[in-house]
Image (cartoon, rainbow, N blue to C red):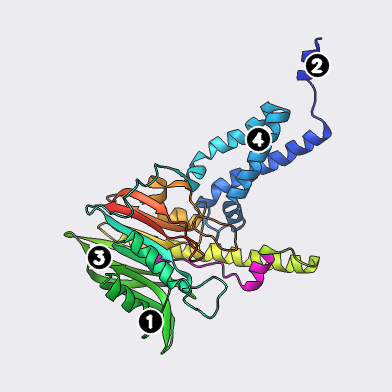
């Protein structure tokens, strides 16, 4: 027997066997994550955690591939094969379209209608409970630079009068004469909620009363556009409801084992109930939108990843502007929790999607997204 054959038949050592076992577990977790978009969290909630952990699970499998390529290349086929099997899941998270051509942002094509969704977080920094409107001018300038014809805003804060009456500002200074605003909380001084702002006439509007929670709502408007009517939904699905103590736990190591267990259970409970609530909201919205006979847009902060049941439900029969014209890893959230793609623009099949972009400006804990569309 030759020396080369002895090397080829060499058995795995203890360390490599242990690594292979961990690799099998990681590959299994990746397979389970592929099922998350199709299993209702109300039926079996644990699988939703694999969906939200898809990016991390994928990265772990990539590390195993690199390890085996160095040690025993044939074993790299395990994770590589699972990755190929889930190519559709990978495509939900990354776009390969060409970048938006130079000059398109500044000079929109008048043959297209430009739409934009932006969770502005009250025009204030994420950790500012006093609502100082610190980023108001930055956000208004950004919106002007994109110049959308239809603008969906979540977490809009507006005062009844004065310089912070944002609804009046959008109407009088930025050209959005047609507005549908629904307050999720208000008093005699100010209100915050959701708005659909349009440069084209809003002929009717409404809101979905089912499964509203806190500041989370879904509103809609029918907009007259060049002889047709576009139904536009502004969506803010239920958030996980994290409190300051939860973000502190995520960002810093706990001081005691008891604190770690308690915080982990609390966050797990919030995640579980968030998954279940969004699945019900998505179901209600999907049924409502199916009654629309003409072109339809569903935009907003879905508070869930592309590998989730809620996003999969809403995407059925619709085009995801990111998947059609997106480029790069599509994250839209930049807060304390791991960054994900949670803001979307969905369009019905008769609508053409020409451009799409995530604007990477940190004026909120969300990045705005916009798209150029045609009927």
Residue 254 placement (x, y as % from top left)? 75, 66
Specify which label sits upstream in the sequence, 2 or 3: 2
Whether residue 320 is visible: no
Find disc 3 in the rendering and name its residue.
223
Residue extent of the magenta highlight: 235-250
Q: Residue at x 30, y 63 (%)?
A: 150
Viewer-nearest residue: 175 or 152? 175
Considering depth in this image, is 26 or 138 the residue closer to the camera?
Answer: 138
Q: CA distance from mark 2 to mark 3?
A: 74 Å
Is the residue under label 2 in contact with that under label 1 (CB below 8 Å)?
no
Q: Earlier in the sequence, mark 1 or mark 4?
A: 4
Real-space Cα separation, disc 1 to disc 4, in angstroms: 57 Å
SS at circle 3? strand
Q: Upstream in the sequence, badge 2 or badge 4?
A: 2
Q: Which residue is mark 4?
A: 65
- Sequence order check: which comes first, mark 1 or mark 2? 2
User: From what the image shows, is residue 287 above or below residue 214?
Assistant: above
**Location of residue 362 in the rendering, given as x and y in whole percent from the top left corner:** 50, 62
Percent across and percent down for residue 43 are: 55, 58
Q: Nearer the viewer, mark 1 or mark 2?
A: 1
Q: Are marks 2 and 3 in contact (CB under 8 Å)?
A: no
**Residue 227 is at least partly visible in this image:** yes
Other-residue count near label 3 (Cα within 10 Å), few / some / many at <14 / 14–19 / ≥20: many
Secondary structure beneath label 2: helix
The residue carrying pointer 1 sits among few (fewer than 14), some (14 to 19) or many (20 or more) residues within 10 Å by Cα, namely: few
Q: Which mark is residue 163?
A: 1
Residue 244, horizontal then vertical, whole percent = 63, 73
Q: Which residue is mark 2?
A: 6
């Amino acid at each position: 027997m030759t020396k080369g054959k002895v090397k080829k038949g060499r058995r795995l050592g203890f360390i490599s066997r242990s690594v292979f076992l961990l690799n099998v577990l990681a590959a299994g977790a990746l397979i389970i994550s592929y099922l998350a978009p199709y299993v209702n969290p109300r039926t079996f909630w644990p699988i939703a955690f694999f969906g939200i952990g898809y990016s991390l699970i994928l990265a772990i499998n990539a590390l195993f591939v690199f390890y085996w390529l160095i040690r025993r290349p044939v074993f790299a086929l395990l994770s590589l094969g699972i990755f190929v099997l889930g190519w559709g899941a990978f495509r939900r998270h990354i776009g390969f379209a060409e970048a938006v051509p130079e000059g398109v942002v500044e000079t929109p094509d008048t043959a297209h209608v430009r739409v934009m969704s932006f969770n502005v977080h009250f025009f204030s920094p994420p950790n500012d409970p006093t609502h100082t409107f610190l980023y108001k001018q930055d956000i208004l300038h950004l919106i002007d630079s994109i110049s959308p014809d239809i603008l969906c805003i979540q977490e809009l804060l507006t005062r009844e009068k004065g310089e912070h009456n944002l609804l009046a500002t959008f109407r009088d200074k930025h050209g959005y004469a047609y507005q549908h605003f629904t307050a999720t909380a208000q008093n005699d001084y100010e209100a915050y909620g959701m708005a659909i702002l349009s440069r084209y006439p809003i002929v009717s509007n409404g809101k979905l009363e089912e499964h509203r929670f806190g500041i989370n709502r879904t509103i809609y408007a029918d907009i007259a556009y060049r002889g047709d009517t576009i139904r536009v939904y502004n969506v803010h699905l239920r958030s996980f409801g994290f409190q300051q103590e939860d973000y502190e736990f995520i960002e810093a190591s706990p001081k005691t084992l008891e604190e770690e267990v308690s915080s982990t259970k609390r966050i797990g409970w919030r995640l579980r109930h968030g998954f279940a609530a969004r699945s019900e909201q998505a179901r209600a919205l999907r049924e409502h939108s199916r009654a629309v006979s003409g072109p339809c847009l569903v935009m907003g902060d879905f508070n869930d990843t592309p590998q989730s049941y809620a996003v999969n439900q809403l995407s059925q029969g619709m085009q995801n502007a990111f998947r059609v014209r997106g480029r790069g890893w599509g994250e839209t959230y930049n807060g304390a929790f791991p960054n994900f793609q949670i803001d979307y623009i969905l369009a019905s099949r008769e609508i053409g999607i020409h451009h799409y972009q995530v604007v990477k400006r940190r004026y909120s804990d969300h990045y705005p997204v916009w798209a150029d569309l045609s009927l």
